[in-house]
Image (cartoon, rainbow, N blue to C red):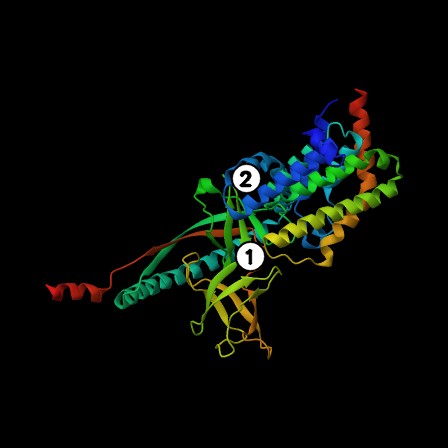
Amino acid sequence: MREILRRLGGATPATVRVIVMIALSLALMLIDNRTQQFEKLRNVLQTVIYPVMFISTLPREMIRAVTGTMEASSTLQSENESLRQENLLLHSRLEKLHSLEADNRRLKRLLGQSEQIAENVLLAELVEVSLEPYTQQISLNKGSSDDVYVGQPVINGDGVIGQVVHTSQFQSTVTLLTDPGSAIPVMVMRNGLRGVLFGTGVRNKLALPYMTADADIRIGDLLISSGMGGRFPTGYPVATVTEVLQQPSDEFLTINTLPVTQLDHGREVLLIWPETIKEQSVLDQQEVVTDE
Amino acid sequence: MNSVPILVSFLVAMMLTSLPLPETAIIYRPDWLILVLIYWCMAIPERIGIFTGWMLGLLLDVMYGSLLGQNAMAFSIIAYLVNILHLRVRMFPLWQQSVMVFLLVILHLAISAWIRGIAGQFFVTWTYWIPALTSALVWPFIFIVLRDIRRQISSK
C-alpha cells in the first residue's frame, strides 16, 4: 500500500493518515447529518465528557452560592411575601382557567372536533455550559431517564422557547426558536391567521414568510402556537409582530417578529408532553341510532 | 514520560472552552483546545499527532453538539500541518509562532463555518474570526506554561 502511494507522489505516512481521517470525518458527518445512527455513540461520549462539563459549571455555581448566602434576610422575607401574593393571584386565575377549559371542551365536543386535554409538564434547569458559539442552543439537566424525547416542546413562564434535538441519559439539548433550522406553526391570536415562524440565527428575531400582501396582519399582533403538525401544543405565546414590510417586487410580505421571552435567559424551563384524544362527534352517534 | 499532565492540559482546555461567559466576553474566547494541541504536536510529535487531534475534535463535537466529525476533521488537518512543519516552527521566535497560530485558528474557524454552512443555514459575522486574534495573543503564555510542564515530565 505504501509503495503504491509513494509512487503516486511521495506521500508520507502522515499524509496517508490525514487523508484517511478526513475521509472518515466526512463519512461521519454525512451519516450524522442524515440519520440518527450516532445517537448512542453521542450519548456514550457525552457521559464520558460529563465530568468535564460539570466542573465548568462549578465557578458560576460557587458564585451563586456565595452571593446567595450573603443576601439579607429582609430581602428574602419581602421576596417571599410578594411571591406568596403572586401565588395566590395565580391560583385564583387557575381556577377560572379550569372552568374555561371545561367550557371549551364541551363546546368542541358539540362541534365534533378532536380535543386536547391538559398537558404533562416537567421542570428542568439550564445547564450553564457554553455550547458551540453562534448556534442558538441550550442544555438542560433532564434527559432520557426522565422520558424526555427528541422533538419535545420546551416553554417557560412567558411562552415557547424551542424544541429538544438531542437527549442523553441525564441531559438534553434544546434548539431555540431563533436557530436558523427552527420552524414553529403559529397563528395570529386576533384573527386565527395561520403561518410558520422561522428562526433567523439572529437573537430576538423570528421571521414569518409566505404571507401574501392581503394578509390581515399588523404590527403588535401576538402570534401563538397553532398546534398544526402535532409537535407544539396550541395556544402558547410565541412572538409579537414588529415589522410588516412590502417590497414592490416581492410576492410576499417581509414580517419580522420579536419572541415574547428572552430565549436563553432564565434558569428554569418546562418540558411538555402534549396529549391528544379524538372524540367521536355527538352528531355521528345520533346518525348511528337513526339508521337502525 | 508521564502522560497525565498532557491529559490534564487537554482537560483544562476543554473546561475553559465550555466555561460559561457573559455574552460580551464569549466572542473573545481563544481556541484553547487548538492551542494546546498545537503545542503538543510541536513538542512531542512522536506521541501527539493526527489521531490524537482527531479524537479531541470528536470530543469537542460531542461537547458542542455539532455534527460528529466536523471538529474532528479540522483538528486532524491542523495536527497534520503542525506535524509537517514542527521542526522549522520550533526554531521560530514566539511572535512568528503566534502568526502561525493565528493562521491555524483561522483554518479551524473556516472549516467549521464551511461545514455548518453546508449542513444548514449559517451566517458569518466579522466577530466570528476574533478568536483567531485572541488565540495568537495568548499563544506565548500557553507555550511557556506547557513547555515548563513538558520539561518537568521529561526530566523525571
Q: In the current view of this chain or complex, which residue is farthest to the top?
A: B156
The chain carrying label 2 is A
Out of A183 and B5, give the one closest to the viewer. Answer: A183
Residue at 52 percent across and 78 percent down: it is: A213
Pointers 1 and 2 within a single chain: yes
> For the residue marked with disc 1, what is the amino acid?
Gly
* Residue A3 seen in this snapshot: yes
Residue B61 image point, x, y percent: 62, 42
Packing grade of label 1 (10 A; few <14, some 14-19, many >=20) is some
Q: Foreground residue, A227 or A3?
A: A3
Quadrant housing the N terminus of chain A: top right
Please identify the quadrant where the C terminus of chain A is shown: bottom left
Q: Are marks 1 and 2 in contact (CB under 8 Å)?
A: no
Residue A181: image tag? 1
Per the image, label 1 sits on a secondary structure element best described as: loop
Q: Is residue A291 left or right of residue A229?
A: left
In the image, B75 versus A254, the foreground residue is B75
The image position of residue B145, as x and y in percent, is 80, 34
Give residue A14's mark.
none
- The image shows a total of numbered marks equal to 2
Q: Is residue B10 visible?
A: no
Name the residue rendered at 64%, 43% in the picture.
A66
**Residue A186 in the image: above or below residue B61:** below
Q: Pointer 1 indicates a residue of which chain? A: A
Q: Label 1 to label 2, Cα distance in Å?
A: 20 Å
Q: Amino acid at mark 2?
A: Arg
Seen in the picture, residue B106 relative to A211 is either above or below; the reply is: above
Q: Which residue position holds label 2?
A: A42
Specify whether A157 is left or right of B100.
left
Instruction: Name the spot of residue A81 as percent of width and height, x first.
Output: 51, 56
Earlier residue among tags 1 and 2? 2
Q: Position of residue A11 (x, y in %)?
A: 74, 34
